[in-house]
Amino acid sequence: MKILPLYPDIPAYLKKRGLEKKFEKKRALFEQNPFHPNLDTELLEPKHMRIWSFRVDKKYRAIFIFRDKNAIEIIEVNNHYQ
């Protein structure tokens, strides 16, 4: 699974929170298997919007959409509990 280039503000968000290494580890895992159990990939509500997320760590999730069968676009990384 290919991940399209990140929006410019996402790397800054990750760096500010010290998440770069965690994100890259999860990104590599996602590229191998988007539904690996360690990612906790899920379809968000409302499901008809087709917005998904995977876990970066216990607190942060990457929000993404499928562009086609082989590529996704990460639209946001956020604090899952806010």
Image: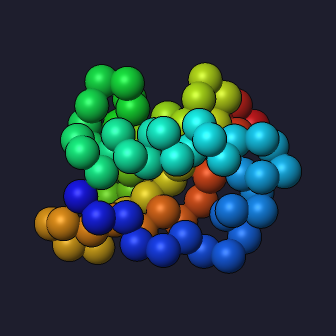
Identified at 61% across, 23% down, the residue is: 58
Classify residue 57 as left or right of residue 54: right
The residue under the point 78% across, 52% down is 15
Image quarter of residue 40: top left
- The answer to whether residue 21 is left or right of residue 75 is right
Question: Residue at the spot x=62%, y=41% of the render?
Answer: 21
Where's the N terminus, which quadrant? bottom left
Q: Judge by depth and name the residue closer to the eye, 76 or 34.
A: 34
Q: Nearer the viewer, residue 41 or 36?
A: 36
Across and down, in percent, residue 66 comes to: 29, 65
Quadrant where the image shows the C terminus: top right
Whether residue 25 appears in this view of the structure is yes
The x and y percentages for residue 65 are 37, 63
Quadrant of res 54: top left
Q: Horizontal and vertical percent for residue 36?
A: 27, 31
Which residue is drawn at the image coordinates 55% and 70% (left, top)?
Answer: 6
The foreground one among 41 and 44 is 41
Query: What is the quadrant of residue 43 in the picture?
Result: top left
